[in-house]
Image (spheres, rainbow, N blue to C red):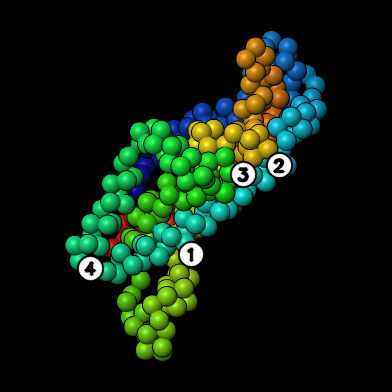
Amino acid sequence: MRLNKGSSFLITLFLCAGAVISFFPIYLAIINSVKTQGEMFTSFIALPTRLHFENYSQAFHKVHLLNSTLNSVIVSVLGISGIIFCAALAGYKLSRTSGRLSAMIFSLFIASMLVPFHSIMIPLTRMAKALHVSGSTYGLAVIYIGLGVNMAVFLYHGFVKSIPRELEEAARIDGCGEFQTFWRIIFPLLVPITVTIAILDFLWIWNDFLLPLLMLTDSTKYTLILSTNTLFGEYNKEWPLILAALVLTALPVILIYGFFQKFIMQGIAEGAIKG
């Protein structure tokens, strides 16, 4: 349906208003991260009279940025790799296998997506301690794999249905086993949905606060978000430093999301709708 000029103008105006509202908190965080504490409390919205970039250098050292970033990268890379490896195999096998058992297993994956994290928080921490995976960045990555694989299986399951079975039959005729067929023929065709899953899980793992707070006790193993939380004192909150640390924390996410954003909606739509 073709829109007239009036409707098009209203839609454009509405989208611009939404963009301004969405960007406004980012604007406040950036301008107040280069102010002094007193200047920020005097006028939270006004531009700074002088740029105090030393807030960023202080935040860099206080949150141990390099070590915390390394911990976040380790957790994110291991978690995303494990989610993709397990979910791609499970989604492919469940999609290509007919029968009640396959349908029941897939339904369990879907049902687990409806369980809120807060309802399993206490049992999860107890199980992590019993399995000796708490207090470790590697153990934290394993937990992220378990929590993130259900959504990834759902997306892979739908995407695999769009791939013709004739490709697998041709590979078997050429002597490929089932595992070789998947990794050499099927998995390269799953790149769009794989990129989408990787980005969504990266945003989730990188920005998550509650699970690292529950699992990590050693400050040297804190993730970046958890290290930023150490700037919040009981009686003293250095807001310019906190905002500077938050800007540094969000910068990698913004850059990666901006670079790969075209894959996200495309991959979700294809994975959820196809088949």
Q: Is residue 139 left or right of residue 159?
A: right
Q: Earlier in the sequence, mark 4 or mark 1?
A: 4
Q: Nearer the viewer, residue 56 or 104?
A: 104
Q: Are the residues flagged by discs 3 and 4 in contact, CB closer than 8 Å?
A: no
Which amino acid is tagged 2?
Answer: Asn
Which residue position is annotated with label 1?
191
Q: Is residue 6 left or right of residue 230?
A: left
The picture places residue 269, in percent across and down from the top left corner, at 37, 54
Q: Nearer the viewer, residue 79 or 253?
A: 79
Which residue position is annotated with label 3?
72
Q: Is residue 202 visible?
A: no
| Quarter of the image that includes the C terminus | bottom left
Q: Is residue 157 above or below residue 118?
A: below
Q: Secondary structure at mark 2?
A: helix
Which residue position is annotated with label 4?
98
Select label 2 or label 1 by which is in front.
2
Q: How far separated are the C-alphas under marks 3 and 2? A: 9 Å
Q: How far separated are the C-alphas under marks 4 and 1? A: 24 Å
Q: Residue at x 42, y 75 (%)?
A: 179
